[in-house]
Image (spheres, rainbow, N blue to C red):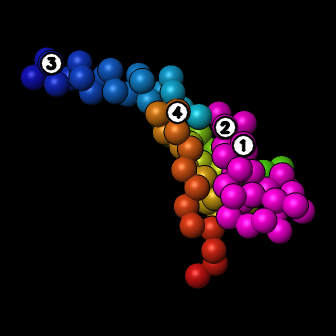
Amino acid sequence: MVKALVGVLVVLVLAFLLNPGPEAHRDKLKKEIAARSQVAAVLRIGDLAAFASNYRTLGVASYSEVNNKVVTYGAFGIVFVPNLTEK
């Protein structure tokens, strides 16, 4: 029981310490948009989207939004960009 609690505590502390900051989210968004479209790369659409994004943190994880749509998720030092196409 104690080992499990210590393990959970270690994971939570690591998640808190490794939570990606706003620049990590912006950089990943810029790179991902440029990688998905050559036109967007030339027009630097990723820079505009990154500038317009709003960073939010949950302490152990974080995300960023553009126009109230989540465009990046981050945890443990890694930022993920979901499929950005409108459904």
Instruction: Provide the residue span drawn in magenta.
Output: 21-48
Q: Are marks 2 and 4 in contact (CB under 8 Å)?
A: yes
Determine the secondary structure under disc 1. Answer: helix
Q: Earlier in the sequence, mark 4 or mark 1?
A: 1
Q: Which mark is residue 2?
A: none
Report x, y in % for residue 4.
16, 25
What kind of element bears circle 3?
Answer: helix
Verify whether residue 1 appears in magenta. no
Helix, strand or loop for disc 4 = loop
Circle 1 residues within 10 Å: few <14, some 14–19, many ≥20:
some
Alpha-carbon span between mark 4 and mark 3: 25 Å
Kind of residue at disc 3:
Lys
Give the residue at mark 2: 24
On the image, numbered disc 1 is attached to which residue? Answer: 27
Q: On the image, which quarter does residue 52 sit in?
A: bottom right
Estimate the spatial distance between the alpha carbons at disc 1 and disc 2, rounded to whole Å. Answer: 5 Å
50 vs 82, left or right, is right
Magenta region includes residue 23 = yes
Amino acid marked by disc 1: Asp
Q: Position of residue 24 (x, y in %)?
A: 66, 37
Q: Is residue 56 above or below residue 16?
A: below
According to the picture, the residue beneath numbered tag 3 turns out to be: 3
Q: Which residue is at 63% across, 68% downward?
A: 84
> From the viewer's perspective, is residue 14 above or below residue 59?
above
Q: Is residue 52 visible?
A: no
Q: Which mark is residue 77?
A: 4
* Disc 4 residue crowd, few under 14, some 14–19, many 20+, Cα 10 Å: some
Which is more N-terminal, label 2 or label 3? 3
